[in-house]
Image (cartoon, rainbow, N blue to C red):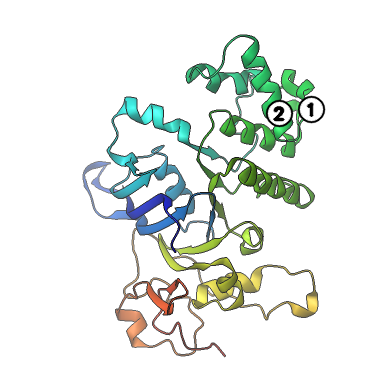
Amino acid sequence: MTEPALVQVEGLVKHYPGDRKWWGLGAPRHLVRAVDGVSFRIAAGKTLGLVGESGSGKSTVARTLLRLTEPTAGRFLLENEDVFRLDPEPLRRLRRRMQIVFQDPYGSLNPRMSVRQTLREPLEIHRLAAGPGREARVRGLLEEVGLDPALAASYPHELSGGQRQRVGIARALSVEPAFLVCDEPVSALDVSVQAQVLNLLADLQQRRRLTYLFIAHDLAVVRHIADEVAVMYFGRIVEHAPAEAVYRLPRHPYTRALLSAAPVPDPAAQPQRIVLQGDVPSPAHPPTGCPFHPRCPHPQKNERCRTERPELREVDPGGGHVAACHFAEAPMS
């Protein structure tokens, strides 16, 4: 039985105007297709890992869902409420239910505000606590993310990167959200600290039954936290499946290349590295056919790949595994 979805994203599109004809005036000559038709669902208490290299559109998805930037088209249902259709006041109330943990644990905190002020601010805005109760909430939040409450008087520059990211997580939790967007929350941290933060997020999810959209550029990072994995390339999802299926038998050549670059504990088990040639195409000038075909190492690549764009299709009947590749069933040599 399929679990009910807390988060449903349907046909999300975000286009930006490109350069204009004359001195910044007139209609844009072309559009920058940052996100071009992304759809997914996340069941309550589960994690979707959204993975891809820089420029694939992952962070644009995150910022658009939270309406930090406005979408061009599509729907986003959170607890069956269409976020994209909300007016400012109901949107402000709904923001309690959806929060974000940013990539940069220093840039996302106000350097002029102490940890106490940072955590008190959302409590005051949403009128969740006052007086002694507010101070107790601040102490409780710090303890919940593994920080000494004595750090409440500290400022961001006095904290380590891991401590700053824990403060960012505590700030997100302060308004009791149901949906948390984690936008590469460990990529700026030391490897030794990354595992601690990932374990913290997993513990918080179990304790609070949080739903995560976990964004990363490294498939190894999401391996032990994601229930499902969606791989993005050039503004589109090119593969989506339960996490175990993606790691056991990836079907898209781009996913295979990402997996080959992820380090494994046993060097003898490291797959042969797949080195992609060239760069990600310009979203202002997309290639014809499959967007991945200029870099694709698949031996069966042919004229169809250059002229016909593949759509997501089921490649494992009943297994929930979809991929956008004409040769998803064919092995790579």
Q: Identify the image quadrant of the C terminus.
A: bottom right
Is residue 275 left or right of 231 when viewed as pictured?
right
Is residue 108 left or right of 4 when viewed as pictured?
right
Q: Quadrant of residue 262?
A: bottom right
Q: Work out whether 45 lies above or below 96.
A: below
Mark 2–mark 1 contact, CB under 8 Å? Answer: yes
Structural crowding at the residue carrying mark 2, measured as other residues with C-alpha within 10 Å and reported as few (<14), some (14–19) or many (≥20): many
Q: Work out whether 185 lies above or below 252.
A: above
Which residue is outermost to the front?
A: 1
Check disc 2 and give the amino acid type.
Answer: Leu
Question: Can you identify the residue that label 1 sits on?
Answer: 148
User: What residue appears at the point 53 percent right and 39 percent down from the top-left corner?
Assistant: 100
Q: Position of residue 231 (x, y in %)?
A: 50, 64
Query: Is residue 17 among what the camera can see?
Result: no
Residue closest to the eye, 181 or 14: 181
Residue closest to the eye, 308 or 215: 215
Check disc 1 and give the amino acid type.
Answer: Asp
Q: Quadrant of residue 93?
A: top left
Query: Is residue 248 among what the camera can see?
Result: yes
Q: SS at mark 1?
A: loop
Q: Work out whether 75 lies above or below 229.
A: above
Q: Quadrant of residue 322?
A: bottom left
User: What residue appears at the point 61 percent right and 9 percent down from the top-left corner?
Assistant: 131
Which mark, by number, is residue 42? none
Question: Can you identify the residue that label 2 sits on?
Answer: 142
Q: Position of residue 33 (x, y in %)?
A: 34, 56
User: What residue appears at the point 40 percent right and 44 percent down from the top-left corner?
Assistant: 65
Which residue is outermost to the left?
A: 26
Q: Identify the image quadrant of the N terminus.
A: bottom left
Structural crowding at the residue carrying mark 1, measured as other residues with C-alpha within 10 Å and reported as few (<14), some (14–19) or many (≥20): few
Which mark is first along the chain, 1 or 2?
A: 2
Is residue 237 left or right of 174 when viewed as pictured?
left
